[in-house]
Amino acid sequence: MSGNGTREKLDSLDLRILDLLNERANLVRHAPNGGAASADPLRDLEEHAAVVERLESAQHDRAGAFPSPALAAVFREINSACTSLRESISVAYLGPPGTFTHMAARSHFGMSADYREGSTISAVFDAVMRQTARYGVVPIENSTEGGVSFTLDCLLEYDLFVRDELVLQVAQCLVGLHHDVTRIERVYSHPQGLAQCRTWLAKHLPSAQLVVSPSTGAAAKQAAEDDRAAAIASQLSAELYGLQLIRQNVQDRVQNATRFIVLSNSDAPPTGVDKTSLVFSTPHKKGALRAVLEIFDEEALNLTRIESRPFGARMWEYAFFTDFEGHRADAPVTRALERLRGVCGHVKVLGSYPRSA
């Protein structure tokens, strides 16, 4: 086929794709509540994973040429754009633009959401609590450094639900105005970013002052204004703030991932593949924690995480953040929660939501 013939055929296919996109958008826009599209925009997006799974299976059966990994990205944006026709989805995230939280939010909600940056994690909670944003995205746990204390403390303070979770592979980069590492006197980053690169920084920049920033995006912004500094941040941050990519993958562990949670004022309905997060405290007496763990064991609930944080006005009091499989509407979880309230000083269900793959 000649070059001109190929171009003409591609143009024709592009127009067919455009017509199908318009047909899909009109169907979503005019679907009644309870129809093909949900009245809950996040539920539409949560169903995206099942849609992609079906499409990948269909693509495999067809032995199609279009790369299967790209299907998720393409249909995420289609779904995001169509969902926004029914209702604008406002999402608060730990900013500024370019943070890993920003990247996680975009990977979950797509480019068509209305993103609103918060300068701190508590600002994101506050935006959702005051309903200036419908959803919020914050980091809760890193595979290298463990729980994010700011988020755990806010979960204790605010009456919000964990509505969803997502995991993002985190590639930390050293970024700055130039490539001359001998001129770097300061390294800016969020505490988690500095901690994830502790060994690398000690080896390659042992004399540099480590400066804590509110976020990795804020760190990149600071480095863009400081000729003697660099930042531990994302590659996207470097692009957004006009910085050089000095080193890539400077995290101490090659496999470095962060789990993020989606905050909402409403709970998630059961899906059959769910997780429940709660926080509890125990009295100061022998065997108190063991009695709690026995309840989970007797109800055959699989604990996936347990972490303690200081709790209450008295010294040495702790709250235990716990994740386990199941939805709080499930009978075993309902029984466990009732039993926990009988032996714990404090029990707060943070939310039941779909488990991340």
Image (cartoon, rainbow, N blue to C red):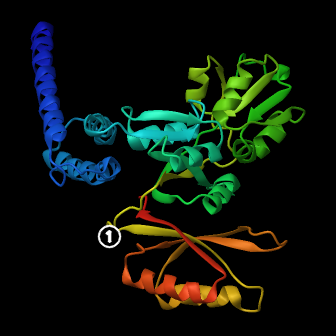
For the image shown, how many numbered marks are present on the structure?
Answer: 1
Other-residue count near label 1 (Cα within 10 Å), few / some / many at <14 / 14–19 / ≥20: few
Classify residue 75 by image quadrant.
top left
Image check: 90 left or right of 208? left
Question: How far from the left and from the top, in percent, is residue 193?
Answer: 70, 42
* Residue in view at x 9 percent, y 18 percent: 12
The image quarter in which residue 7 lies: top left
Which corner quadrant holds the C terminus?
bottom left
Q: In the rendered image, is residue 173 in sight?
A: no
Q: Residue at x 57, y 21 (%)?
A: 240
Q: Amino acid at mark 1?
A: Gly
Seen at 86% across and 25% down, the residue is 185
Q: Nearer the viewer, residue 130 or 2?
A: 130
**Rendered location of residue 209, percent (x, y):** 87, 33
The one of 160 and 324 positioned closer to us in this rendering: 160
Query: Residue 249, how many percent across, how many down?
Result: 63, 37
Q: Nearer the viewer, residue 240 or 255?
A: 240
